[in-house]
Image: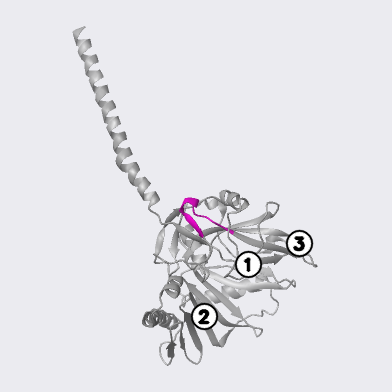
Amino acid sequence: MLKLKQILKKKYFIACISIVLICCMFIFYIVFLWENTETKMVSLPILPVENYAEYSASESYMAYDISEICDGNPWKEEWNIKTLPVFYNIDFKNSSTVQNYDDKINIMKNKVKHLEKIAENFGVRDNYTITYGTAEGKIENKEISFQTSIYDSTIFIEFKKPIPLPFDTTEENKEQSEKVISYFIDNYKDCLNWKEAEKALHFDYSIDGEKYFSLYAYEKGNTIEQELLNYHFHTVHIATNEKNEITSIWLKKADLSDKIGEYTIITAEQAEQLLYSGNYTSTLANTFSQNMTIVKTELVYRNTIYDSIYMPCYKFFVQMPHIEGDGLHHYDVYYIPAVEQQYLKHYEDVSYKFD
């Protein structure tokens, strides 16, 4: 009996010690780990949500059906992305905050150095001229020119001797347009320092019903996040003429070195609820109303020269009630930031100062 009491006493003691240890671990988590997690969450900077209507060109589309409109965006809702990075637009930062002449010249010198590397990739190693000022820089020879701007990361490359295509493109359609993109990628992706590329054909109609193709490609990414970033920031836009030739390209490789942070992303459904509550931005004067129909949704990064930051947004295509005479539908576009609302602050314009 005495032995049994000793055993029970020992078990009771062990149980008490276990409870004390569990309580200590819980208190440690609350005081240290949970506090650090909370601090990490609230330490992310607040992001500006800017009103673009006064600055950007109106963004709307025309088509007989929404299924015709394409832009090559690789995003799929089933990707179920949880977080995405946000970056400062360094070109916007430089052009809006740097006022000193010498500082602007130094920025342009660095951009011209980058131009020289691109030019070398295209075989331009000697017998070329360099000109630059505070706003633009240019490298050229008799066959090709490369032009950059302080306002944007896009490089305009003009082939003074256009590149002849080995096939006929007089009949402009999706198949022929993608064939041109494939030809350029196959022959010039090394000049762009791309390992692999994806076609990103853009298509809609003019208000007169004329088909409008824009030939785009982007560097393929190794991850879902990189694929989405490259689609928006590592692209080439190809221009052709009526003589079956490639005349120029716009090469975009944005500087994403100034990362603000990694932010939690809301779902498309949550963003749609915000749209219906009127919490949106748009380049249009039209006001979104409850009776309008959302017909297409994309996850995008806005990356115009007016965007002070590169932030993921949901892009909603909304069908307008009126129809053009030949049956064309009009689709307006509205944006909802994909970042959680607690990290956002709305601005009426883009003239605020950087910290």
Checking the image for residue 59, the label placed there is 1
Identity of the residue drawn at 40% across and 62% down: 259
Marked residue nearer the N-terminal end (3 or 2): 2
Q: Nearer the viewer, residue 155 or 180?
A: 155
Marked residue nearer the N-terminal end (3 or 1): 1
> Height in image: 278 above or below 250?
above
Q: Residues within 10 Å of mark 1 (few under 14, many from 20)?
A: few
Three-letter code for the amino acid on which mark 3 is drawn: His
Task: Judge depth for marks 3 and 2 and give the one in front.
Answer: 3
Q: Which residue is mark 2?
A: 156
> Height in image: 186 above or below 159?
above
Q: CA distance from mark 1 to mark 2?
A: 23 Å
Q: Which residues are magenta?
A: 335-346
Q: CA distance from mark 3 to mark 2?
A: 38 Å
The x and y percentages for residue 276 are 63, 51
Q: Is residue 208 left or right of residue 280?
A: right
